[in-house]
Amino acid sequence: MKNTISKHTAGVGRTMIGTIRTDVLAYTAGKDVKLDMCLVDADCIGSAAHVTMLAGLPLKPHLFSARDRDRVIAELARIMRRADRGAFTITLQDQDVHLAVERELTSRLGALGRKIHTGRSRNDQVAVDLRLFAKEQLLAVIEEALALGSALLIQARRNRGVAMVGRTHLQPAMPSSVGLWASAYTEDLLDDIRLLKGVYDLNDQCPLGSAAGYGVPLPLDRRQVSDLLGFRRPIHNVLHAGNSRGKLESGILSALSQVMITLSRLSEDLMLFMMPEFDYFSLSPDMCTGSSIMPQKNNPDVLELVRARTARVMACNQTVMDIIKGLPSGYNRDLQETKEPFMLGMTMTRASLRIMASLVAGLKINREALRRGFTPAVFAADHALSLVARGMPFRDAYHYVKKHLDELDDLDPDRAIALKTHAGATAGLDFAGMARQLAAERASAENEKRRYFKTISRLLRIPYPM
Amino acid sequence: MKNTISKHTAGVGRTMIGTIRTDVLAYTAGKDVKLDMCLVDADCIGSAAHVTMLAGLPLKPHLFSARDRDRVIAELARIMRRADRGAFTITLQDQDVHLAVERELTSRLGALGRKIHTGRSRNDQVAVDLRLFAKEQLLAVIEEALALGSALLIQARRNRGVAMVGRTHLQPAMPSSVGLWASAYTEDLLDDIRLLKGVYDLNDQCPLGSAAGYGVPLPLDRRQVSDLLGFRRPIHNVLHAGNSRGKLESGILSALSQVMITLSRLSEDLMLFMMPEFDYFSLSPDMCTGSSIMPQKNNPDVLELVRARTARVMACNQTVMDIIKGLPSGYNRDLQETKEPFMLGMTMTRASLRIMASLVAGLKINREALRRGFTPAVFAADHALSLVARGMPFRDAYHYVKKHLDELDDLDPDRAIALKTHAGATAGLDFAGMARQLAAERASAENEKRRYFKTISRLLRIPYPM
Amino acid sequence: MKNTISKHTAGVGRTMIGTIRTDVLAYTAGKDVKLDMCLVDADCIGSAAHVTMLAGLPLKPHLFSARDRDRVIAELARIMRRADRGAFTITLQDQDVHLAVERELTSRLGALGRKIHTGRSRNDQVAVDLRLFAKEQLLAVIEEALALGSALLIQARRNRGVAMVGRTHLQPAMPSSVGLWASAYTEDLLDDIRLLKGVYDLNDQCPLGSAAGYGVPLPLDRRQVSDLLGFRRPIHNVLHAGNSRGKLESGILSALSQVMITLSRLSEDLMLFMMPEFDYFSLSPDMCTGSSIMPQKNNPDVLELVRARTARVMACNQTVMDIIKGLPSGYNRDLQETKEPFMLGMTMTRASLRIMASLVAGLKINREALRRGFTPAVFAADHALSLVARGMPFRDAYHYVKKHLDELDDLDPDRAIALKTHAGATAGLDFAGMARQLAAERASAENEKRRYFKTISRLLRIPYPM
Amino acid sequence: MKNTISKHTAGVGRTMIGTIRTDVLAYTAGKDVKLDMCLVDADCIGSAAHVTMLAGLPLKPHLFSARDRDRVIAELARIMRRADRGAFTITLQDQDVHLAVERELTSRLGALGRKIHTGRSRNDQVAVDLRLFAKEQLLAVIEEALALGSALLIQARRNRGVAMVGRTHLQPAMPSSVGLWASAYTEDLLDDIRLLKGVYDLNDQCPLGSAAGYGVPLPLDRRQVSDLLGFRRPIHNVLHAGNSRGKLESGILSALSQVMITLSRLSEDLMLFMMPEFDYFSLSPDMCTGSSIMPQKNNPDVLELVRARTARVMACNQTVMDIIKGLPSGYNRDLQETKEPFMLGMTMTRASLRIMASLVAGLKINREALRRGFTPAVFAADHALSLVARGMPFRDAYHYVKKHLDELDDLDPDRAIALKTHAGATAGLDFAGMARQLAAERASAENEKRRYFKTISRLLRIPYPM
């Protein structure tokens, strides 16, 4: 086994802003350099807004003329295109995307590049980069959640009349239906989307102009930058702009954890009820994987991994909270370590939603196996309630049925689920209403995305996304 | 040392719904019985709504006549009053508040008591109890957060011109002010309140009528129950009503964790800057505690405990998520264990907000000590930016100043903070705007509380809260 | 609903060491006062050792004469007896058990009581109290773990020949046996005990004599105190003695979490395989609980609660680690908040082990149901390996069997498990060896306990435990 | 911004053991393929032992002749060499290192490659790979911890007489010394090493021969395989061999978390006391990093990152525990997700120990600044204890000093620390004893490593590590 940590010589490297020992650089910047590759677009977009605002400042001499501004923006767009085709890299000496972009601008535009950092710090750059990243990712998560919600609703409508044993404590409880089971997850996802929209709003505030968290003696127009980037509004207090880092990520990861817990429960149900002893559901065979030793195996690995990744996304949230708990105000380098769990939580949630939507769409419902699950005991509560309908107090009916459990008639599952007519029960499900909610959420997410892309395209003067 | 777990004989106890071995009862119901004492009011309120709805059902014979309904409600109110004065207890045999109240109703009203459980299960009772509990607690948390936000804003306005060294990495960074520092926390709390309101909305849905998660063959009017209890709307899918348990608690605890992280950072700042080497802030002496061995000690225990309880509230959230991760759908007894961390998280957050509001109000700001913190290096960025104003590209100015650090003039801190005039910086803070936001939030929380109390008073026919 | 946090007037209370505002006392000491009741014995024992050592110090004048020492020890024993019968209380003014005991000694013995705190601080008192508490609890946890391991081994031996479908990914995999399944948990617990013994050793170091973490200008005999209390040795560095707090608790809670994860897996297996669709195992009916609405229910609540409490014990560990992460050296009040999760983790683990031992002992193994689980596919790997035995390369045999899955003969489960004769497989289990290991561990734990009780009895001059 | 999750076409890929849809492969195998590159050596070593054992089995026909065995081992060594120079890759179609190695063997050796998987499963392969990986990593962690412990001890000895204000609650408490402070961490690390050795022992058991967790109908010699690989002994029960996965990783990560918490506290101390207001310690300038906006900054980023990575390692542990909590017995794919946090926790801890050893070695102790920290109040407890020495009961002395705090004489810090002569206090530190402990631990770790490398070299017939 090789050392996964390479041995660093104690050489020194010259960075944009000073010299650092190589082993220190490796320990401090290490993985960040790689993670920052996901932020190249956001960083260029942020710089385009910053330079546009600087060019408008009433300073003598002007920081950037209109022509300078246009040259910088064109160069930023070029960097984005290069990054897109893998031709832009961030080196360890750069430390991060911010200095890499500044280096590139400086090498191409000279003094214009050396001016770009006027009135800002890397702290507010990374803050805005992460918020732009989060904005796109959250919109995508919402869309994937809606797609899964729809796939579930389709299964629910299609199988609304398919009886299924409802369980509590894993034990057979009362008659239920596939329609009730599947649409419960649709409503669950709609709850999750509510939380996602809440953190989307929290995210939708522009930190730029905070500099190192203490502002600058320049008349920055923070509202303009915020508008140029399509944010709802700027964060006001510049120290709060910095302090919000980590907290925002944790807020978002909490909402993502809720989504994952929904998926985890769905996975657990499917894993249980696709065991041959139940055989209620079958996954599409191309969704399963085999064993290296047992030729017969057809394993639901996707579901197991969704369950495990739920733990991972939860832990991403925990990581971020543990990192920031107890930190004083003002930027601390600890925050860098929130980046990886934040990005990981986002991408795991998106990928899990997407694969589950595909899995649910291909799910086979085995009506006969589902019916075989019914035994007379499943109808015990229904029996008790029919005695109630004839005037017996419920607790008496309960004890009467409990005493005569062995004598219960076997009822018809189809009839049992048809009798639950109140709102939200097996025969009272408002599928049309759920479909309308999904459609409304989808329209709202798409509008927001369109509006955002239009704003950024206007800023960059090229279509975005490229 | 005595066993903290008493030795249980393997006797058996008769409960409302069967017999259970004593050691099993102790393991299963144990602490829940004590925690449920916090839910007596909510449980009685939920039952009042349930019986009101049952009495209106178009069944022959009627489940409850109008007179029966009134007797049950009066008896529920009586239980609330008894609980209030410590005269109502839940025994281990009862297992929980639900069966304790049913027992009490039955012992006083006979058959009416035995009817009360018609069309519901303990699962949806505890779900509604916790949502009613959460509603009141969340409103209180929001009010305490607003009170702290106001105390901070008062300090900020009063000390807007008091210069303070702004730090990053704990090292002196740039000129800041007490006004910037304190009002950053006000804005932070306003962000937190946004998340609290999000989970308040999520909570504001009525689960009643889900029974064991599979509905009942009775024409329950779930919308009516929801209205009677002042919920915004019922949860639709009855299985989702049960599945949402645990997830809701975790959503709320996430928002509470955000509040606590705000308090943790504030505490950390105060602990650091009240060390005698800084002496920026002094706590009121009656906020400090002493040492058993060192006569001179005046320790900021409150702040340390706020920091530690931040970890505890975070762990409450983690507990709930760990419990529900991987559970299948339908009620599982695991959920019981979410109750204690949920309640603990709520009460710790409220208590921490309250003590911090008092502590902040009594904080002494030591203007001279704050000024002593300034050294020429703190003005380095300001120097660089003044070169920028004279036309030097920022990166060149940065390197120039870096090279001449030892020759920097000492600037005037007051002037330095007066020069940062852009929005949100030391001289650009909109205190009036923040005050308006706090007032608007307070009005909204008070309205909501008033509306809710009025609805419950109407249901119980007595003023609530008693 | 009543406020769970009572409204505190801003009165002031006079404590042993100063005055504190009532609301501050409530926030700071609050629950600690109650938790400290579990530490009365340990605190008195620690004080008995401390006074014995002080009495032996070569100081002029002597701090304590031999007679003084005996009077103090007798009074400490009296406090222990009073606490035992509920007649000793810690008030909020006391703040904690240490000052409560000092107050009591002072009220009974005057100057002797005012001398007892010589050369120590509450910090090292609580450190020693918790280590004595942990010592007894850990020995008890080990004993309960051994009892459960034995119960499992008895089931394993009794059912060594009962075939059971072995699963991976929950899907049927290969032939297994109840003997293999049950004894896997015995070995798991033996691994856990190894970790428990590791943290027992870590705990077995005496912190006394560290005072506030910086020693005292008195010639304390720290080795003697350590010996008097039965510790293996004193912690050396006095600052480390304080710094180890929190870390030790987290180390112990990690080991307890391992135990709980073993129980969680066992619970999960049992819950699954007692579903009527499997019916492999039946719990004793008096281990189950019912439903308030469904008369037929017989739910495995104990198992669900063990699974949930696994999450809680894990979260206790997480709480402690989150609290101490980022703390500077020297005592910080944050540490107080580690007490509750520490005690909770201990008692939950003990209680869970105990109830599981009882549950496993009463487990009914349904041989016929277990046999019904076998289908031809379960033997696929065995078929492939029989082709290997005839010379076919394994991967070819694997693909051959995979292609002919539908034509596999149904093998005899009993024969299949009899053929796995290598060490640790169904027919190669060394039950006698496992029994010997359990016995050796039990003897070692009992010796340690006996030795410890004898040491403490000698110190107190009365039999301990009382 | 580009999608970080590429869009997968629903193509299908042919793997060694079947066909899987491309998007499913990407979701299931994804990152694992990359992580498995760290396991190539371990996997080849495990296979060398397996084939050696198979070649010795008394089967007719022989599975492997002595010559076959040697050819396989030589080929495995070749794969290790190729991996070492980056010439061996694992493809997504391979799914993992196990099938990649089998594919390579098969392509080079034909039937011999197709035989290698006889009597094992990937489950026990990955189990043994991870245990071999953990063995080497843990030995390295122990060595790095000892190096840091030594660096601290050197600072302690060198500065044993340098007085330093000891603190509790961050407030000045009592006189201390740099010797006490630094050597506290040495003892802390020695405690940590105790736990590391405990989990090293737990890890030092060989899982091979468990196959899919249910053994095989072949007379595998599990003891021989264990010996060939240098394990202390085989795990006995084959189901336990599989069940231990995840738990073992969590046990190890718990011990690593303890190490990180030690580093976190050390970092916190250093960050605080290198603030210019204290200036007790100075980091070597090449250990610091600058700011992009503030030319004067010299930030302790390494220390902040150590603190943050403490949270990350803790979260790695939490991740693993959350993943396995609630899993049933037998292999579940969830376990794959424990691999990344396990490896990450290992490498982060090693890297953090290493950089801290370098940082501590270069630490500058500013004697004058340390002395400036002393104020009369720091000596209050010493004053009280001097009254005790003259016969006043401690509590009276405490109150007397408390009343006369303003009149305290300023004592000499050097004398104050010279007076604390009891074991473990400022003038009673046993540096030689600590040095002996470090040396003994180092010798023991080196012996173990030498023994292990020798065993593996014998197995591979080439020097290992290469």
Image: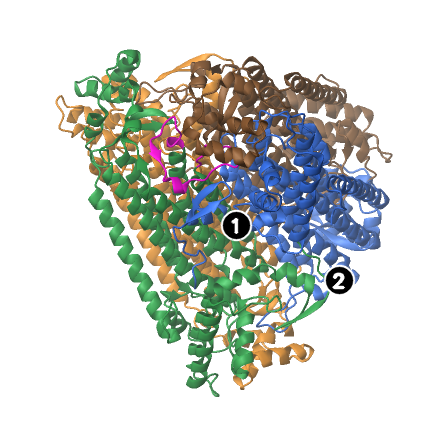
Chain colours: A orange, B green, C blue, D brown
Quarter of the image where one finds residue B327: bottom right
User: Residue A277's x, y, as percent?
Assistant: 67, 60
Residue nearer the viewer, B339 or B88? B88
Q: Nearer the viewer, residue A345 or B252?
A: B252
Helix, strand or loop for the magenta stretch, by majority: loop
**Cα distance, mark 1 to mark 2?**
51 Å
Is C195 one of the magenta-colored residues? no
Image spot of residue C182 (x, y percent): 76, 51
Q: Which quadrant would the N terminus of chain A be assigned to in this image?
A: top right
Vertical relation: D26 (above or below) A118: below
Whether residue A235 is visible here, answered yes or no, is no
**In the displayed structure image, the side of residue A416 where residue D197 appears, left or right:** right
Residue position marked by numbered label 2 in the rendering: C369
- Kindly indicate whether the residues beneath marks 1 and 2 are on one polypeptide chain: yes
Q: Looking at this view, is D427 or C359 the one in front?
A: D427
**Residue A83 location (% of width, % of height):** 36, 28
Magenta stretch holds residue B292: yes
Q: Of the numbered discs in the image, which one, if any, rests on residue C31?
A: 1
Location of the C terminus of chain A by quadrant is top left
Please state the extent of the stretch shown in magenta in the rendering: B272-299
Query: Which of the two discs, 1 and 2, labels the residue nearer the N terminus?
Result: 1
Q: Reply above or below: B121 against C140.
A: below
Q: Amino acid at mark 2?
A: Ala
The chain identifier of the residue carrying mark 2 reads: C
In the rendered image, the vertical position of residue D181 relative to residue D92, given as above or below: above
Query: In the image, which is nearer the foreground, mark 1 or mark 2?
Result: 1
Q: Label 1 is found on which chain of the structure? A: C
Foreground pick, D396 / A91: D396
Q: Which amino acid, mark 1? A: Lys
